[in-house]
Image (cartoon, coloured by chain):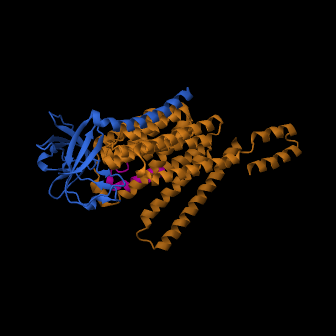
Amino acid sequence: MKQKWLHHESMKWQNEGIINDEQRKKILSKYEKTDNQSLIFFFGAILIGLACLTLVAQNWHDIHHLIRMGIILFFLLLFYSLGNIFFDKNKSVYAVTCFIIALSIFGAGIFLSGQMYHYSMNDVLAFFIWGFVAFLVYLSRPHPMIFLSGLLILSAGQIYGLFSLNIFDWSLFALFMLAFGTVVFVRKDMTLSYFFAWLYLIQITIFTVDQFDELYWVIPFILMLYIAGLLVKSEKIRKPFQFVSTSVMFFVVIVQAFVFESNYARDQLDVHYSYYILLFILLIGAFLLTWKDDRLKIPILALFFPVFIIVDYTLLIAYIVLFIFSIGKLIEGYEKLERQHVIYGTTAFLISTFIVYFQVAWDYMDRSFFFLIGGLLLIVLGFLLERHRKKYMNEHRKEV
Amino acid sequence: MRKKIFIVAVALQIVILLGMTASSYVIEYVGDVIEIQTEPFHSKHIYQNDMVELNYDIERIRPENWFAANDIKSNQVIYVLLTPNDNGIYQVKAASDKRMDTQGEEVVITGRYMYQDNQSFHRIRLGVNRYYLDSNGEIETFDDRLTVTIALSPWGQKKIIDVEPVE
């Protein structure tokens, strides 16, 4: 499709004298036809592999232990060598698929032999070994999807540990932070940083649930992610870290606004003062760093404010926090003339407005009337914001 | 360099899988071999004609042998100190969530905490509760106890060596 288009367009350019024939051929040769045939073979091979797997799975109990292990090892080696062949031929998609399949076979192998030989899996050691191997494979064949596989294995291990053993495993966390974290800081790659930041949230959520029992303890750790972003100068780490931490906090503040509406949740809440001390120290640190770096970003820090500090006014404080954030984001967008910030700010502003409206008006308004007014409110707000945005952008463009 | 790491990574996986296989064969020689008894066995414990579910005596621990903290969560690791009786069958001497020292013929086996039943017995699970018989062997129905021979490795692995009806 793309090729047809390029063929067509380049002809036009040649006719209009933008490029000459030689240049056109050079451009076209850059986008060679992809090899569709090998794709067919590849999927054929995967289907045959699946057939073998189901056959083996159906007769698993009748097969002798050693033969089972032989089958696992055979497929393990098969997919690693296949992946390596593709890798040498520069077909990274196939190579990565093979490596991920091989990693899955290894994981399945550990758990199956654990079951066969009655290892009582006393801890999440199996996940640690699995994650470590994934890390080695990533080091030798660096591809974001293998990196992601490793992070997912560690997160799965942590989730398994919490639900079945009631523990937070420090070794998994250490591997996550030290091995995978180092890669993030060395490689400075946007995709890796996003993966790392999202899955860091799973690690710390489980840590919080296990160690503190109270979910609000997760906030300082999200703030730490934000601060880590501030400390790193590379945009490719900073942006993902800050985007992930602020998006999550926006959501967390909304959830808190709803949760502390109930009297039960309010009565249950008992925050140790050390929590506030830790949070405010971190907030002051974040404030100072932001002040030195980019003052327009200071309103973002409002999101990390503990909205339940005066629990009876949680709702009000949450609204103030949400609006400070949204308007701060809008101002940042307008000042820097960055479309993306304006879009985030607008979205956040509209969501916040709607939530306030929802909480205030739901109880005493007729339902259809409620939605009608809500819709109109959003349309009017959206219209005003959009008009302001255009006007502002135009004015600044003229100046430039 | 990358090639080397790749080879190491693949080799490591093979060594781990082979090691897990090999360890189950050496466990009888390096570990303790003990005999424990199951609770009375019923035909209802037979599944799919070739698998039996084993419920061991030592998985039901009397309150007087229980020395664990009060806030035990389910699935937490429990160490059970076993000592042989006159017939050589191992019985519970003590159970706790902390490691215990052994003397003489005593051994420690690990299990996972389940719950406290209505007679205030603490229930645990050893994790070796399934035994596959040779698929051609028919299981006779009987209501009696079984004696199970188990090998325990120093690294916490267990293996069922033999299952026999109590004579």
Bounds of the magenta segment: A306-324
Q: Where's residue A121, x and y in %?
A: 33, 43
Judge whether residue A242 can be spotted in this image.
Answer: yes
Left or right placement of residue B72 versus residue A85 in this view: left
Left or right placement of residue B103 versus residue A337 in this view: left
Q: Where's residue B19, x and y in %?
A: 39, 35
The part of the image, by quadrant, that contains residue A126 is top left
At x 46%, y 39%, the residue is A226
Residue found at the very far top of the displayed protein: B1
- The hue of chain A in the figure is orange
Q: Main secondary structure of the magenta part?
A: helix
Left or right placement of residue A350 versus residue A41 in this view: left
Q: Where's residue A374, x and y in %?
A: 51, 66
Q: Is residue A277 above or below residue A373?
A: above
Front in this rendered view, residue A209 or A284: A209
Front in this rendered view, residue A161 or A345: A161
Q: Is residue A323 a member of the stretch shown in magenta?
A: yes
Judge whether residue A291 can be spotted in this image.
Answer: no
**Chain corresponding to blue in the figure:** B
Q: Where's residue A267, x and y in %?
A: 27, 56
